[in-house]
Amino acid sequence: MTQQPFAAKLFLAVLSLLAPQAAKDHFPFDSLRRLSDTPILSPQGTTWESAGTFNPAVVTRDGKVIMLYRAQDKQGTSRLGYAESTDGIHFTRKSEPVLSPETDYEKDGGVEDPRLVRFGDTYYLTYTGYNKKDAQLCLATSKDLIHWDRKGVIIPANKGNWNVKWTKSGAIVPQKIHEKYWMYFLGTSADGKDQTGLASSPDLLHWTEETKTPVLPVRPGHFDSRVAEPGPPPIVAVGESGRILLYYNGADDKLVYRTGVAAFDANDPRKLLSRSDEPFFAPEKDWEKVGQVPNVVFVEGLIRQHQSWWFYYGGADKYIGVFEGHSGGWLR
């Protein structure tokens, strides 16, 4: 594990631009560092994961870190691979994918960009079903993270309040609030901007949009001027009046992807309290700058490890990396 210079520089630079309360919301970490200079997962073979392995979801189970990751073949079709690790850095993969395109809403394009959350003994997987025509937010459930039961499209494309095109990226809040389940998701508005919306559910299976406008819109002139897309399932921090911390992937007009964070009210998940003025993680390594899509770090997985939070991300739509935020203050 190697200390990287980006952490201290970026951390201090962003803190200097934020008001004290916003800084506390956004940076409940003492330090940030990459845990590996090189990818922890890379494409391999000549078949289903030969072109890209990226955009991972992670959970801990039975003392191991379990990763579901998007794997792409050279024809551009995506499947979900399975890997596990005892240290969170060195992973062993299954030889075959655990979720492959089968339904009409997945055919030809595939299954993409997983997020994972657990309620009781059931894992809930949100993913994008893409059929080369529409991308739509879908759901599947499992008891063992290997065998998956599809529940279908949960936020359809082309039918939303403001998200009148594609839907993606379902980040489910990991606890009920006011007797409902909540999910931040990506929708595409009529002007082609990708922004974050909010939906709720009584049962985790049937979802309804909660707002008429995005709850985390894009911002002209900022690092998230073109895309403001949910990352991993949020952290609910009950102290300090209650915060939902949503780490998100922002892209500017040149489609450079960086990482930001937004704080929502834990008593009202619709209410945005503050957000990053500047990103706190950005492409720096060659393998984050050069790949299938250049200049991309895209966070989708987040777990608690000891006194730290580990963020798993895709690099340049080809590789997987991990960085650590060491807990400080009220997010212990």
Image (cartoon, rainbow, N blue to C red):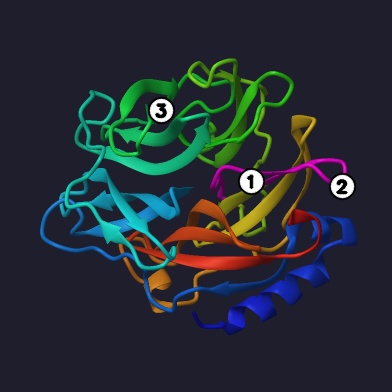
Percent coordinates x, y for residue 97 in the rendering? 22, 45
Quick one: SS at disc 3? strand
Count of numbered circles on the image = 3
Name the residue tied to disc 2.
240
- Tell me: residue 87, above or below residue 168: below
Name the residue tied to disc 1.
218
Q: Is residue 113 left or right of residue 242?
A: left
Of callouts 2 and 3, the N-terminal one: 3
Depth-wise, is mark 3 or mark 1 nearer the camera? 3
Q: How far apart are marks 2 and 1 (CA)?
A: 27 Å
Furthest residue in direction front, as rendered: 62
Percent coordinates x, y for residue 276 in the rendering? 72, 57
Viewer-proximal residue among 8 and 296 = 8
Q: In which quarter of the image is residue 124?
A: top left
Q: Which amino acid does label 2 sit on?
A: Glu
Residue drawn where x is 41% and y is 71% of the image? 289
Q: How crowded is mark 3: few (under 14 residues within 10 Å), some or many (20 or more)?
A: many
- Tell me: residue 16, above or below residue 27: below
Q: Residues within 10 Å of mark 1 (few under 14, many from 20)?
A: many
Q: Quadrant of residue 107?
A: top left
Q: Can residue 45 be seen in this view?
A: yes
Marks 2/3 in contact by CB < 8 Å: the verdict is no
Of callouts 2 and 1, the N-terminal one: 1
Magenta range is: 226-245
Q: Distance between the residues labelled 2 and 3?
A: 33 Å
- Label number found at residue 139: 3
Quadrant occupied by the C terminus = bottom right
Q: Which amino acid does label 3 sit on?
A: Leu
Q: What residue type is labelled 1?
A: Val
Depth-wise, is mark 2 or mark 3 nearer the camera? 2
Of callouts 3 and 1, the N-terminal one: 3
Percent coordinates x, y for residue 247 in the rendering? 62, 51
